Structure formats: structure tokens, C-alpha cells
């Protein structure tokens, strides 16, 4: 099965205009002009995401005070319309998680850890992989109920 890609744009700051966001960036730069642009961006977005912004906008290793007016506007504009390229998946591609706590380390009757008494596990934190069609959901609900009843 073939799916057409879809371009999606996400506004991370729907309550602000691009100009307001640009002003926030300028204020952040004024607070720490000698810091790397990535570090100053982390005043506004999570640090891990700031690295993505710097990479996508090709700011390199610039310090905050080295960013041009156009680059600051580009950052604000990008944050107001983050581009994502969404692709479809076919049957069997739905698996999101794999691995987890080894079932040999869990009492299957209570879902309590055999290593750390008083700690209970449920759902996809466990190393259980099922086929699609509700098997993972069933395992999550069943282990969740078991863990909850025994933890209480």
C-alpha cells in the first residue's frame, strides 16, 4: 500500500504573533548576547528542540549577538510554522514500542518487581510485543488492573 506524504505546519505559539515572538527572541538575545544561539533559543523552547531549530535554520555555531535581523525573524517565523513531513504507514507498521522490563523480573500474578519489592509494572513498560488489533491494549489493561489491585 502506498501513501502520499503530507506536509503539516504546526504553530508552537498560537497565542502570539510572529512579531511578538521575534521581540521575545530579541529580549532573550539581549539577556545573553555572548551565549551560543542554541542556548539562547532554549530560553524559549526546550533545549533539545533548540538544537533542531539551529540545525534547520543553519545557524551553525553562531553566538546570539551574531544572528542577523533576518535570522531572528526566520527563527520566529519557523516557530510559528514548524514544518513536518508526515508519511503514511501500512498494516504491521504500527508498532511504536518494543523492549521494556524483562518479564523474568516481574511476578506475573501481581505485576510486582522481583528486584524492587513495592514497584509494580503494567502496559508497554513491560517487554511484551503483540500483534496489532488490540493485543497490546488488552495486555496493557490486564496488567494495569492486576498491578493496581495488588499495589492497593
Image (cartoon, rainbow, N blue to C red):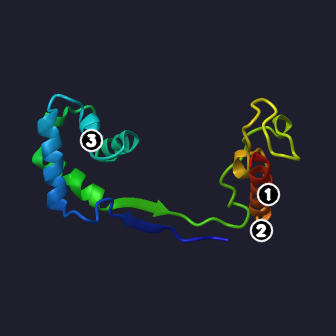
Q: Nearer the viewer, residue 149 or 145?
A: 149
Q: CA distance from mark 1 to mark 2?
A: 12 Å
Numbered badge on residue 139: 1
Q: First in sequence: mark 3 or mark 2?
A: 3
Q: CA distance from mark 3 to mark 2?
A: 43 Å
Which mark's residue is nearer the viewer, 3 or 2? Answer: 3
Answer yes or no: do the residues labelled 3 and 2 have beta carbons within 8 Å? no
**x and y percent of residue 133 in the render?**
77, 68
Q: Residue visible at 28% across and 56% down?
A: 78
Q: Nearer the viewer, residue 106 or 79?
A: 106
- 55 with respect to 32 (left or right): right
Q: Residue visible at 26% across and 31% down?
A: 61
Q: First in sequence: mark 3 or mark 1?
A: 3
**x and y percent of residue 88 in the render?**
58, 67
**x and y percent of residue 58 in the render?**
29, 42
Q: First in sequence: mark 1 or mark 2?
A: 2
Which residue in the structure is indicated by mark 3? Answer: 43
> Residue 100 lies in what quarter of the image?
top right
Q: Residue furthest right?
A: 109
Answer yes or no: do the residues labelled 3 and 1 have beta carbons within 8 Å? no
Numbered badge on residue 32: none
- 21 with respect to 146 (left or right): left
Which residue in the structure is indicated by mark 2? Answer: 133
- Up the image or down, 39 lies above or below 72; here it is above
Which mark's residue is nearer the viewer, 1 or 2? Answer: 1
**x and y percent of residue 117 in the render?**
77, 33
- Disc 1 is placed on an element classified as helix
Amino acid at each position: 500500500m502506498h501513501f502520499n506524504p503530507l506536509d503539516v505546519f504546526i504553530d508552537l505559539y498560537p497565542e502570539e504573533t510572529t512579531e511578538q515572538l521575534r521581540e521575545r527572541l530579541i529580549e532573550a538575545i539581549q539577556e545573553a548576547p555572548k551565549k551560543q544561539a542554541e542556548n539562547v533559543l532554549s530560553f524559549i523552547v526546550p533545549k533539545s528542540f533548540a538544537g533542531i531549530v539551529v540545525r534547520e535554520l543553519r545557524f551553525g555555531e553562531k553566538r546570539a549577538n551574531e544572528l542577523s535581523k533576518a535570522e531572528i525573524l526566520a527563527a520566529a517565523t519557523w516557530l510559528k510554522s514548524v514544518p513536518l513531513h508526515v508519511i503514511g504507514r501500512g498494516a504491521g507498521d504500527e508498532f511504536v514500542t518494543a523492549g521494556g522490563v524483562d518479564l523474568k523480573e516481574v511476578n506475573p500474578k501481581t505485576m510486582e518487581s522481583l528486584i524492587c519489592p513495592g514497584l509494580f509494572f503494567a502496559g508497554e513498560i513491560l517487554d511484551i510485543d503483540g500483534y496489532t488489533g488490540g493485543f497490546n491494549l488488552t495486555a496493557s489493561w490486564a496488567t494495569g488492573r492486576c498491578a493496581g489491585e495488588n499495589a492497593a
